[in-house]
Image (cartoon, coloured by chain):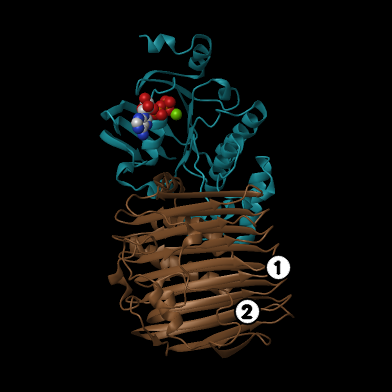
Amino acid sequence: MATLEIKNLHVTVETEQGTKEILKGVDLVIRSGETHAIMGPNGSGKSTLAYSIAGHPKYTVTQGEILLDGENVLEMSVDERARAGVFLAMQYPVEIPGVSVSNFLRTAKTAIDGEAPALRGWIQEVRGAMDALKMDSTFTERNVNEGFSGGEKKRHEILQMELLKPKFAVLDETDSGLDVDALKIVSEGVNRVKAATGMGVLLITHYTRILNYIKPDFVHVFVAGKIAEEGGPELAERLEAEGYDRYVNA
Amino acid sequence: MEQHSHGAGVPLQIRSERPKSTKVADFEPITIRDEQWRYLPVERLKGLEADALSEYLGDLQFEGGNSITTEWIGSDHALFGAAGTPEDRTSAASWESTDAAYLISVPAGPEEHAVLTVNSDDLTPSALHIVIESKLHAKGTVVIDHRGKGVLAENLEIVVGDESDLTVISIQDWKAGSVHTSAQFAKLGRNSHLKHVIVSFGGDTVRVTPSVSFSGPGAAVDLFGVYFADADQHLEHRPFVDHSQPNCTSRVTYKGALQGNKAHTVWVGDVLIRKEAEGTDTYELNRNLLLTDGARADSVPNLEIETGQIEGAGHASASGRFDDEHLFYLQARGINELEARRLVVKGFLNEIVQQIGIESIEDRLNKSIEEELKRSVK
Ligand SMILES: Nc1ncnc2c1ncn2[C@@H]1O[C@H](COP(=O)(O)OP(=O)(O)O)[C@@H](O)[C@H]1O
Ligand SMILES: [Mg+2]
């Protein structure tokens, strides 16, 4: 049983107009096996929260804490956080020229586990996970995210999650830009990993659509850098009907 | 990514109007006011700017297959000067200071590869002349591996026979304190193919000027280059393709990484398509990856086209900073910073390294890249 705690998190970013506070006191506790949906309008700071958890250097935490089983995550480097069990499926995965998917996956797996995976078992595991995500086997020979379609990029993120088996996965708008078939495949992937590993999920989304496939235990409405309201799955249904206007204009 | 710009101050010189001569006296003294030397202060040449140089007396070690042969030839031999004529002062000084050239001949028959190691251990300004020829229908690879410590002005001629397919790899892996200017001339025969790979890693100052011309139609040249400059190193490459025959193809692809204070690389890529070179297809590209502050990459592509009857002509040049987003993505998957940098830089350079096709050399380069990177990350 693991716990990821975010306490009174304030985060700033440097802009051309100077320092700008984006997160204004976020409190959130996620336990193993739980799925929390973070829903909010564009620009409310959802990606900033995701990046801050993963440790992106652009974002400065000015107040508050992030704890993983009581350990101070904010003192960890980006790779230490990943090795501690935090995974971020990115909204905009970057292309890495000249680095093949197979090399990348093996290097990441070796880093996370602290030892290289046994070759034969590993190849089978990768192939199995790719089959489940309906990814072509030639995919591994391509360079990381290079020339991938939007859907391929998102599947590739979920593939990594499946292989790296984190304690907590932050999925930043993994649903955006996916057609219904791809959305189903990706959602099944998340549910599969969750069932197999008992990971906790922070599912960031703008739309309620993905919640038809991945059932949240908790829903948090995120507005202007804070959680504006919290509830169970019924809150998502209300958002579906009413939108964010009520919060934004409040 | 920063796009290239033509710097102010020094006028670009039309390539076809540049002086060519085997006589040092025909060239002006070297100054940075001359377009050819604008990036390279004469002090860095450590004596190679002189009128006369000593003949190279260091090691020349040849390892070849069964059929590739070597011999010394005099300057009166038909192959001495068969691929080109000096286009700058150090090349002419080297030419005048050598009365023999080391000839490597690749005959037709089974494909083989050979390595000539130029291993010097003293810093006397020296001259060396090497000629590589591939005969009709020959297919093979010749590696010139420069290592040790030296101050060397070299002329390397590559005479590519009709219908032959030759690969020449020139590695500059000198120890600190070394200076190397290498004028490399290739002349391609009818329907021949040359793959030319430059690998520059070590040496205080390295300047390679590959100059390609054609003696018959239908030939194709691929010029690749990969380089890695550290603090205070100056690595300069000036590939030039002179299209004077119809239906020839050229592809120029150079990639470099730089790190450390005053690491400086220069790439000037010239392509000239003369009136008679109808049906030419050419593309040149240079990319530089700046790993730290204080490094500088100059990148200047020039294309002169004198005929409208061409298949294609283009160029691209960009120098960019190490991308933090790449690093973040990899680190977010548990990969530590050193390993992440290693992956990104090797990935970036890999497009060229994989062109070498000789595993032992590719491994050596990958190791050098790793050594270089260890120096830059904690
Ligand atoms: N690196 C950055 N530089 C400048 N502004 C940023 C940066 N990251 C986020 N912002 C600003 O912070 C706000 C929240 O952005 P983001 O976290 O991406 O929101 P969301 O993911 O909810 O759409 C936006 O106004 C955005 O413009
Ligand atoms: Mg976002």
Task: Say if A181 sits above or below B126 in the image.
Answer: above
> Which label belongs to residue B190?
1
Counting residues from the N terminus, which is met first, the one under dot 2 or under dot 1? 2
On screen, residue A1 versus residue B41, left or right, reads right
| Mark 1 C-beta to ligand 1 under 8 Å | no
Q: Chain of mark 2?
A: B
| Mark 2 C-beta to ligand 1 under 8 Å | no
Which quadrant would the N terminus of chain A be assigned to in this image? top left
Q: Secondary structure at mark 2?
A: strand
Q: Give amino acid for label 1.
A: Arg
> Which label belongs to residue B133?
2
Q: Give amino acid for label 2.
A: Glu
What shade does chain B have? brown
Horizontal and vertical percent position of residue B284 = 54, 54
Q: Which quarter of the picture shows residue A61?
A: top left
Which chain can be seen in cyan? A
On screen, residue B320 versus residue B170, left or right, reads left
Which quadrant would the C terminus of chain A be assigned to in this image? top left
Horizontal and vertical percent position of residue A160 = 55, 45
The answer to which of A209 and B20 lies nearer the viewer is B20
The answer to which of A84 and B328 lies nearer the viewer is B328
Q: Secondary structure at mark 1?
A: loop
Q: Residues within 10 Å of mark 2 (few under 14, many from 20)?
A: many
Horizontal and vertical percent position of residue B356 = 58, 68
